Image (spheres, rainbow, N blue to C red):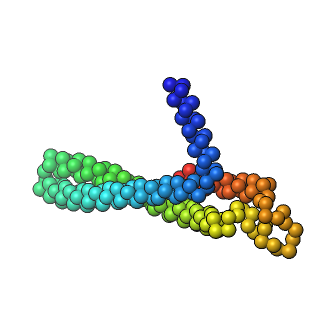
């Protein structure tokens, strides 16, 4: 078992290194994960709405039964049939408890629907952020491919009137830009993990 665990850790490390070197792929994976969460949340909302509809139907049926038994209580009391009146009152009380329980369940389902809708909105917003960041990275990669120059150093070397390091890339600046990009990705991951 130890060999497999070591190999698994090795693969994870290599994958993390690869994604750090290719942030667009990590963003693409995050976007896909958010898309899946969106779909799962929509399915959950649909399921909860079906539960809510079923509970509403149950409550309506219970209310009709309560009315029926309430009428029979009155009829039995008017006919001086305490034996029937007591049984009808017990049945009416049991239905009221059942109705209250179904009402409480329906309120809980409604609350979960609202929470799920809010989660869906948050996931959509995060997905837009990731998509926008992905497009930025892709645009920078395209620009790099066209100029043959690392995208991090293009602005530096475009002659702003200041002294530059020439055509050679500034490794320190690249390190800082990569570090900032990694931090942004980690922040997106953390935000995504909160929900």
Where residue 181 appears, as percent x and y from the top left, is 68, 57
The answer to whether residue 11 is left or right of residue 181 is: left
Residue at 72% x, 53% y is: 179
Residue at 75% x, 57% y is: 174
Residue 185 in view here: yes
The answer to whether residue 174 is left or right of residue 2 is: right
Q: Residue furthest right?
A: 163
Q: Nearer the viewer, residue 45 or 192?
A: 192
Residue 59 in view here: no
Quarter where residue 153 is shown: bottom right
Where residue 9 appears, as percent x and y from the top left, is 57, 35
Quarter where residue 137 is shown: bottom right
Total numbered labels placed on residues in the image: 0
Where residue 172 appears, as percent x and y from the top left, is 80, 54
Residue at 67% x, 53% y is: 182
Q: Is residue 161 above or below residue 35?
A: below
Where residue 161 appears, as percent x and y from the top left, is 86, 74
Q: Nearer the viewer, residue 155 or 195?
A: 155
Q: Is residue 14 above or below residue 114?
A: above
Q: Residue furthest bottom?
A: 161
Q: Nearer the viewer, residue 67 or 109?
A: 109
Q: Residue furthest top?
A: 1
Residue at 23% x, 58% y is: 61
């Amino acid at each position: 078992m130890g060999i497999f665990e070591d190999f698994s850790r090795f693969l994870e490390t290599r994958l993390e290194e690869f994604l750090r070197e290719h942030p667009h792929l990590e963003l693409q994976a995050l976007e896909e994960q958010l898309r899946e969460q969106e779909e799962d949340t929509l399915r959950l909302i649909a399921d909860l709405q079906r539960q809510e509809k079923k509970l509403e139907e149950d409550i309506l049926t219970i209310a009709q039964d309560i009315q029926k038994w309430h009428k029979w209580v009155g009829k039995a009391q008017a006919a001086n049939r305490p034996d029937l009146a007591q049984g009808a009152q017990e049945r009416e009380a049991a239905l009221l408890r059942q109705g209250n329980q179904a009402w409480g369940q329906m309120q809980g389902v409604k609350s979960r629907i609202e929470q799920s809708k809010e989660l869906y909105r948050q996931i959509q917003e995060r997905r837009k952020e990731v998509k926008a960041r992905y497009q930025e990275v892709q645009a920078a990669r395209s620009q790099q491919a066209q100029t043959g120059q690392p995208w991090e150093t293009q602005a530096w070397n475009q002659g702003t009137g200041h002294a530059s390091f020439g055509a050679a890339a500034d490794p320190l600046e690249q390190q800082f830009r990569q570090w900032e990009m990694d931090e942004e990705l980690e922040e997106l991951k953390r935000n995504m993990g909160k929900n």
